[in-house]
Each structure stands twice: as C-alpha cells, then as structure tokens.
Amino acid sequence: MRVWNLRSGELNLVLVLGFALLGNSLAQKIAEIESISRFITDVGAPQFLLLLLVNSMISIVMTGTHTLLVDRFNRIQLLHFTCFGLGLAFIFLRCLFALNAPAWLNNSLFYLLSEQQFIFFPLTFWVLANDLFDPRQAQRLFPLISTLGLFGNLIGIFIAAFSQDLLQRVNSDSAELLSFNALIYLILYLVFLFGLQNVQLRKTQMQVQPFKETLLEGWGFVKSIPAFRYLTISILAVVVCENIFDFHLLFISGTIFTDQNSYQKFFSAFVLIRVIGYLAFESVFTRFLINKFDLKNAFLFSPVAAVGAALVAITNPGLWGGVVAVLLHNIPLYTVDKTSRRSFQAFVPEERRGRVSLFLDSYLVAAGAIITALVVGGIIIISQSLGIMDYFYMYMVFGVIVALIALFAILKMRSVYDASLFNWRLKRRQRSKSIFDKLDSQE
C-alpha cells in the first residue's frame, strides 16, 4: 500500500481493474501480432492501407452504437457484455479458420477483431474507471493500472513470438490462439461479475436523445471548450503521424522478412521493445513528468516527439530508421499523453463523459486512420503512375507538417487551459459520501 501510494479502500478496485486490463492487453497483443504477420506475408503491405480504411469505418459504426449505450446503462454491465461479445467473436472466427475460409478474409477479420480489442474494450473500461475515482485519484492511480496492462502486453508478446514453434511441436496451428483468447474473455467476464458486485456507481440523470444528437454531443461539448477544442486538433494530427510511421515500418519490414514465422519473430521482438519502453516510461517517468510540468504542459511531449520521429525517418529511410521513428513517437503517446488525457477527461461530468471519451479516443482515431489511408494511398498511387519510386519522402514530409500542426495546437491549448477549467460545462461532480471524501479532507 505504501510503496504504490494506495489509500484504504483502493486496493481491491486497483487489482480488479488492473487484472482486467492485463487480460485484455494479453489477448489483444496475441491477436495483433498474429493477424498482422499473417496479413503482411499472405496479402501484402500496400493492401494494409485498404484494411486500415475498412477498420476505421467499422470503428465509427461500432463507436456510434457504443455511444448510445455508454451513458445510458450501468457501465459495469456494459463491460460484462463487451467481454461476452468479444469471446463469441473469437469463437466465430475460429470456426472460419476450421472451415478453411480464404486467407485474405480470415486475416482481415482477425486484424479487425484485434483492433476492436484495442479500441472498444478500453473505451468502456476507462469511462468506468473515471466513475470509480475522482480526478485526484485518477492522476495518482491510473499510471499504476496502466502499468498492469503493459505487463499483459509483455505476456501476449512472448506467447505470439513462440506460438508458431510451440504449436508445430504438438501438431497444431496458430488458429488455436483464437480459442485461447475466447477463454481469456470468459475469465474477464467472471472477474467483473464477482469483483465489482458490491460497487455502487453514482446515479446520473440521463436524457433520451435522438440518434444523431447523441452522436454529435461529444463533438458539441469539445467544440464549446477551447482547451478541448485545441486538444482535439492535436490528437487528430498525432494519430495521423502514428499511422504514417506504422505503415512505413510494415512496408519496409515486409520486404525484408517474407515468410510468416520470421516476420512474426521480428514483429514480436519489435513490439516487445516497444512495450518495455512503455512499461519503463509509464512506471518511472509518467507520474513524475505530469506532476513536475503540470497537466497542461504534459501534452507537449507527444507532438514534440512526432516532429522528431518524422525527421529521424526522413534522414534514415531504412528498417532501423522506421523502428526508431515508431518508438520515439509512440512511447510518449501511450504513456504521458494517454494518462494526461484520461486525467483531463475526469473533469467532464459523468452524464457526458462517456460520449466525450468516445469522441476523443475512437472517432478521432478512426478519422486519423482514414486521412492517413487516403493521403498516403493517394501519394503511392500517383507516384507509381508517374514512375516515382521515392514516394516515401513525400508522405513523410506530410508527416512533418502534420506534427507541426499538433505542436501548434497544444501551444494554443496551454494559453486557454486555465480559463477553460472555469467553464460551467466542466463543473466537478458532487461525490457521494464515501471513504474517498474523508481521505481528501485529510490531505
């Protein structure tokens, strides 16, 4: 309790939430590595842009559906349904593999499902976490919970890296990993069912709204508050940069590692290094940097890293340049920036927090992927038709421009940050009498 700075009454919630995030991260990492390795070697890296576009469209539809549910129903029950649905999806996909469906279909669906694990589950998870903790607790406990999720990533990476060799020894194939993932979500369903059965969430007054108004409420809320508006621009720009760097690495590595086993080992090693970077930075530096530089200044790390990553990739267009660019960009994005965003969202009233969170963490991600697929795909098609082979420099210069836009937006956000906190739409929720109130009064 003392080592991790936990207060009385917090340990059980941290363990339940941390284990749940660990389980989802484990299953997602297995699915991500396996599906991307299959797709790149069996289908090809250029076609991945089309898959990215399809995934973005699906994410928008799924997020729209989720938006109608997240602020209207008990969020613990929503997590029950999410775990149950993901488990059924993996069972269905396992049946397709057993029926020998076309490789492009199986691999595409596998990747699309892994993306829903990465986006859909955390959306409900972090909204629930914000309901369970007040803003001060969120800033203190979220880095610890995120660290447990990163440990799940490590376990999933090791399983994916050696799955091909291990399954071949028992005369099986990697499709059995789908059954393993289905089992994980059954366990998570039981964890939420029994681990949070005594948790009472604050009752909120919900207004029944038409479908269109519900979907647009997140955008309307963000648009009305200057700090959120500039943060939205920065998030969108940073997501575009992330997709550019990721695609470049997949394209370069796909030309070097041509069979699935070797590519999966390379990709697993790369993801392992990336997650270790996340884990070390999250556990050692994230909380310190946010406390040292304040929340509004912590948002500067991600766009500055995006500018640096683009310059690294341009000056070193080979495999190592691509690896360094992704690491340099993603480590601050998925540690300091993500934690800062979640802490900042804790100031949004419960009645709207779910929709605001969905807009920032899902709609913007999907929009950034669509922009990347269209622009980078257009650059490649036009360049190849004109006989230009060094189109890499063209889409990477585009990345530099977008990164500078992200940096400018955060600088503008800092200038209006303090005034935005006094906006009436950001009034802090009135917490019910609990042990947490007593703890706060003692500080």
Image (spheres, rainbow, N blue to C red):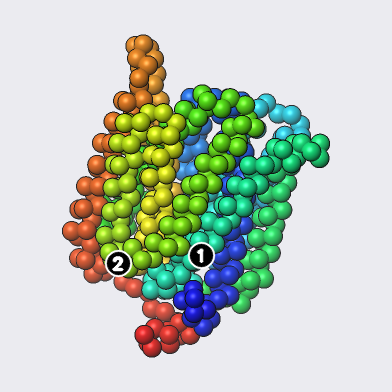
How crowded pointer 2 is (Cα within 10 Å; few <14, some 14-19, many 20+) is rated as few
C-alpha distance separating marks 1 and 2? 20 Å
Q: Position of residue 194 (x, y in %)?
A: 67, 71
Question: Which part of the image, by quadrant, shows the C terminus?
Answer: bottom left
Q: Is residue 322 left or right of residue 34?
A: left
Q: Residue at x 56, y 57 (%)?
A: 151
Residue that badge 2 annotates: 292
Query: In the picture shown, does residue 209 fall above or below 161?
Result: below
Q: Residue at x 55, y 42 (%)?
A: 269
Residue 348 appears in the picture as rendered: no
- Residue 205 tag number: none
Q: Is residue 49 left or right of residue 152?
A: left
Element class at badge 1: helix
Query: In the picture shown, does residue 232 fall above or below 349?
Result: above
Q: Position of residue 19 (x, y in %)?
A: 60, 63
Three-letter amino acid code of the residue under disc 2: Lys
Element class at badge 2: helix
Residue that badge 1 annotates: 145
Q: Residue furthest right?
A: 171
Three-letter amino acid code of the residue under disc 1: Ile
